[in-house]
Image (cartoon, helix red, strand yellow):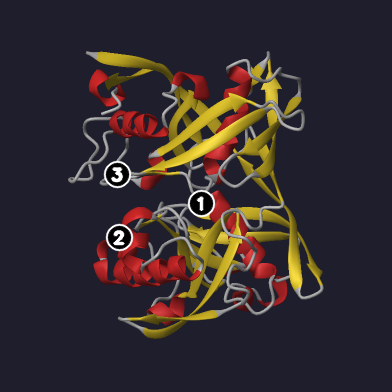
Amino acid sequence: MHVKIPAVYMRGGTSKGLFFHDEHLPRDPKIRDRVLLAAYGSPDPNKRQIDGVGGAVSTTNKVCIISPSADPEYDVNYNFGQVSIDRPIVDYQGNCGNMSSGVGPYAIHEGLVAAEEPVCQVRIYQVNTRKKIVAEVPIKEGLYSEEGDFAIDGVPGTGGKITLHFFHPEASVTAALLPTGNVTDQIDSPQLGRVTVSIVDAGNPLVFVRARDLGLKGTEIHEIDSRADIREKLESIRAQAAVMIGLAASPEQASQKSQAVPKIAFVSEAQDYQTVGGRSIQKQAIDLVGRIMSMGTLHKAYAVTGAICTAGAARIEGTVVNEMMGDSATAEWIQLGHPGGIIPIGVHMRKKENTYVYEEAVLYRTARRLMEGYVCVPEKYFSAG
């Protein structure tokens, strides 16, 4: 026998996953996570998730848990989980900015927020990072107007333009914008020797490394998936950085239990390249090139929280990202070239004494309600044993 749980399957930006009302999930966190893992078909040692709704890549293994907010400053609470594919882990340490774009439309469609035409502001409390997000959602006939003319790279077609305001995204998981107190740090890589990195926490904590220090141009896409040696180098650096900022006790623990954060990205100066879909990106159209990893694999677009962090790092003098920017380092909007195309990020940051205040990041996304009904989970996963 199975238990039917009301759920909505949604795309948010370049990611997708299940949305739940918090009240529809088990109260016990351990049972809840066991149920979510079963729904997604995890853990699957073959990494196919054939016995669940998971799509066998990190960007399709997201879960959003929504509830009404009791705080008058917010409309809804949004708890995000990254579901592991091959391990029994739902990681709640950070947020997914792409899935954040689905929260407003979901809340409106589910009656948690009263729709106001033509644009409805949904005030979101992001539980994982304890931050405020405001989504501006276009409305038609009382619902999110999905059939807009706005396109984002990484998603075919167009949709209704959702504006996301991420307020004070710094210190999302750690205690500071610069968790180590430094704009750069040194990490000893078994494969590369001493490597310079910048560790920045905005939206999510990220570890940045120069592409050239990895022996790369920075425009690689398919090579990352086909070369285990590159992925091993990146994971070694990421795992050591996780220990440095207190998210794991050892690199081994970071690789096993903290797959989602910190994320790692490698960056390079603006240059021409081909997207994963074969489109030509000209260096004149972008400010820098970035490639971000998502739970050990290359993100075929770019994580929104990663874009927030990358844009913030670009403004901080002395980081490896700032080094790539040249004359664009003070631009209000940063054009980041990624495997799927270009993502623009609006950055409002100011310098205060010896540090920086990241006041707001602004991004545009689209979303779509893909399926609604019930996800079926075997009864055995609901037991406390």
Q: Which residue is mark 1?
A: 303
First in sequence: mark 3 or mark 2? 3
Q: Which mark is residue 85?
A: 3
**Residue at 63 percent of width and 21 percent of height:** 108
Amino acid marked by disc 1: Ala
First in sequence: mark 1 or mark 3? 3
Amino acid marked by disc 3: Ile
How many residues crowd mark 3 within 10 Å: few (<14), some (14–19), many (20+)? many
Residue 154: percent from left, percent from top:
48, 46
**Residue at 33 percent of width and 28 percent of height:** 35
Farthest front residue in view:
385
User: Of residues 188 and 365, which is closer to you in this image?
Assistant: 188
Question: Which mark lies nearer to you, 1 or 3?
Answer: 3
Viewer can see residue 181: yes
**Relative vertical location of residue 291 with respect to residue 97 in this rendering, above or below:** below
Residue 271: percent from left, percent from top:
53, 72
Helix, strand or loop for disc 3: loop
Q: Is residue 82 left or right of residue 95?
A: left
First in sequence: mark 2 or mark 1? 2
**Residue at 48 percent of width and 27 percent of height:** 19
**Residue at 23 percent of width and 22 percent of height:** 380
Q: Which residue is mark 2?
A: 225
Question: Which mark lies nearer to you, 2 or 1?
Answer: 1
Farthest left residue in view:
46
Helix, strand or loop for disc 2: helix
Q: Quadrant of residue 318?
A: bottom right
Whole-Å distance between the Cαs marked 2 and 1?
17 Å
